[in-house]
Image: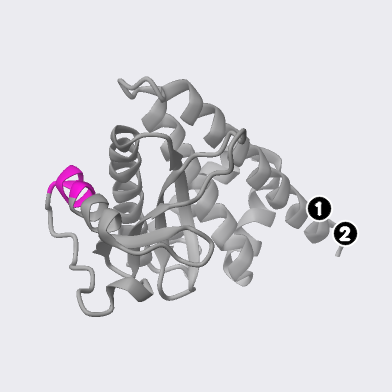
């Protein structure tokens, strides 16, 4: 929760219209004082252990940086899970809907057992990675069972694939831009996963 919202904390997202919650957050953001760095931040809604946030940053003249950001923040790990930069409020609406969908998927996944190699949860998490690295199925399963960081990378890789499929079929002017962003992220995650697999083989 941001320092500005201690007296009026975020409520759980229970099916409310994401666009309405975003507009309320933007109105609240407009009324908040700037921080020392010129930025502002407020909540949009709670989604389980995650908080959906709206941020506005001070953009120096001549720089190509988005002034608005919608962020999904995990309050358990105290880190941002995902964030999307936006130039206008209507773009933030699409970003909010995408991050809400991602947060719901994370909540569903967190309820699945992650320690049984035969479980549906493990197959869901590693399945996409095994498709990407078909010659490393055994190593992927072994690492996913024994290494939390690797398992998290697999989950992130799966989330990114879902996001790519979403944007590939989205009726939005941002489709190509978002697809390019998520494809780049997919390759970054693939490189990290490959590094784990290479180390596993050398042991």
**Tally of marks:** 2
Within-10-Å neighbours for mark 1: few <14, some 14–19, many 20+: few
Give the residue pinned by disc 1.
Answer: 198
Within-10-Å neighbours for mark 2: few <14, some 14–19, many 20+: few
Q: Position of residue 34 (x, y in %)?
A: 41, 62
Task: Name the one closer to the observer, 70 or 136.
Answer: 70
Residue range of the region highlighted in magenta in the rendering: 17-23
Q: Position of residue 9 (x, y in %)?
A: 23, 73
Compared to residue 14, the image places residue 66 above or below, namely above
Give the residue pinned by disc 2.
Answer: 202
Q: Secondary structure at mark 1?
A: helix
Residue 16 belongs to magenta span: no
Of the 4 image quadrants, the one containing the N terminus is: bottom left
Of the 4 image quadrants, the one containing the C terminus is: bottom right
Residue in the image at 42% along x and 23% along y: 175
Residue in the image at 35% along x and 22% along y: 169
Question: Please, what is the dominant secondary structure of the magenta stretch?
Answer: helix
Q: Position of residue 132 (x, y in %)?
A: 62, 37
Side (left or right) of 82 relative to 154: left
Q: Specify the farthest residue to the right.
A: 202
Residue in the image at 63% along x and 69% along y: 147
Side (left or right) of 169 relative to 12: right
Q: Secondary structure at mark 2?
A: helix
Disc number placed over residue 41 in the picture, else none = none
Compared to residue 129, the image places residue 81 above or below, namely below
Task: Name the one closer to the observer, 187 or 114.
Answer: 187
Task: Name the one closer to the observer, 162 or 20.
Answer: 20
Mark 1 in CB contact with mark 2 (< 8 angstroms): yes
Side (left or right) of 119 relative to 155: left
């Amino acid at each position: 929760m941001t320092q500005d919202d201690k007296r009026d904390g975020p409520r759980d997202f229970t099916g409310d219209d994401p666009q309405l919650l975003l507009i309320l957050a933007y109105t609240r953001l407009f009324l908040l004082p700037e921080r020392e760095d010129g930025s502002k931040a407020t909540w949009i809604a709670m989604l389980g252990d995650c908080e959906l946030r709206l941020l506005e940053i001070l953009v120096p003249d001549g720089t190509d940086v988005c002034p608005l950001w919608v962020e999904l923040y995990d309050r358990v790990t105290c880190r941002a899970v995902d964030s999307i930069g936006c130039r206008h409020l209507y773009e933030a609406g699409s970003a909010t809907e995408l991050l809400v969908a991602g947060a719901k998927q994370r909540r569903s996944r967190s309820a699945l057992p992650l320690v049984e190699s035969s479980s549906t949860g493990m197959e869901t998490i590693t399945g996409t990675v095994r498709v990407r690295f078909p010659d490393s199925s055994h190593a992927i399963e072994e690492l996913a069972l024994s290494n939390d960081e690797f398992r998290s990378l697999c989950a992130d890789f799966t989330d990114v694939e879902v996001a790519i499929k979403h944007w590939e079929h989205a009726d939005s002017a941002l489709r190509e831009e978002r697809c390019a962003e998520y494809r780049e992220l997919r390759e970054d995650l693939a490189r990290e996963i490959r590094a784990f697999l290479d180390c596993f083989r050398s042991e």
